[in-house]
Image (cartoon, helix red, strand yellow):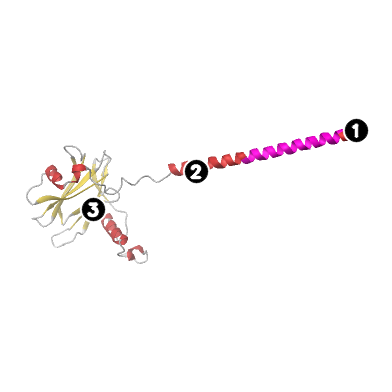
Amino acid sequence: MKNLILVYRKHLFTGASLLLFLALLLTACSGNGASASSSLNTVGLVHSDASQAPLSQNTLSPQPCPGKANNLPYWDKIIGTSGDAQVERVSCGKLMLFPGLQALVLVRHHRTGAIADVYVYASISSEKPAQFFNLPGLLHGKAKISVYNTVLTAQAQNSSTLVPDLFREFKWSDGAGAFEQTTFPGMFPDMTRYQAEADQQKVNHGHDLWKLDALKT
């Protein structure tokens, strides 16, 4: 009887040891699995963050004009200016869903009192750039490319006004195959994008900071 008890205790001890070993083994495996899972989640998050990163903004706003397209005399030849008319400014940007950049060209008529004509050309690196937009006769006219790749113009409505008081915005329409006038979803004090961008520049340089206060505007 005594021998049976000893044998039973021996088997019980062996079984308990085996169970303890299996428990420790499972714990270790579980720890490694959790570590591996954590590592995979981290990689997944990094991959997810990369895939959701903001798109590059290098196609927005005016861009440097390439090669000869940056030369004013080149555009004088393309447009065929003569007399008092002369290309005053050229800027480039992604104004249309066409390959490459497009050029916004401002022609000034000096003899007639600062009348300006505005042009947009595509295929600006080719031998014959294609004209897609022409807005002539802007009194005290100005034009620029917005930060949203639209054409902004400013002009005086009559000869008694020495500063521009009419601001317009034109956006390329694939459906119409042309530039169409669009509206700016702005509020007081800036009702047009031309004015809003001009004021933003002033604020960036520390001027008119009151316009950042919603209570004052």
Give the residue drawn at x 72%, y 37%: 21
The amino acid marked with disc number 2 is Leu
Q: Position of residue 35 (x, y in %)?
A: 59, 41
Quadrant where the C terminus sits is: bottom left
Please provide the residue range marked out in magenta.
Answer: 7-31
Instruction: Name the chief secondary structure element in magenta.
Output: helix
For label 3, the residue is 168
Residue 188 visible in image: no
Residue lying furthest right in this view? 1
* Marks 3 & 1, CB-CB < 8 Å contact: no
For label 1, the residue is 3
Q: Element under label 1?
A: helix
Q: Element under label 3?
A: strand
Q: Is residue 112 left or right of residue 131?
A: left
Is residue 199 rendered magenta in the image? no
The amino acid marked with disc number 3 is Arg
Mark 2: give few (<14), some (14-19) or many (20+) Cα within 10 Å.
few
**Label 3 to label 1, Cα distance in Å?**
107 Å
Give the residue drawn at x 67%, y 40%: 27
Q: Is residue 196 left or right of residue 109?
A: right
The amino acid marked with disc number 1 is Asn
Mark 3: give few (<14), some (14-19) or many (20+) Cα within 10 Å.
some
Q: Picture quarter containing residue 155?
A: bottom left
Q: Position of residue 112 (x, y in %)?
A: 9, 55
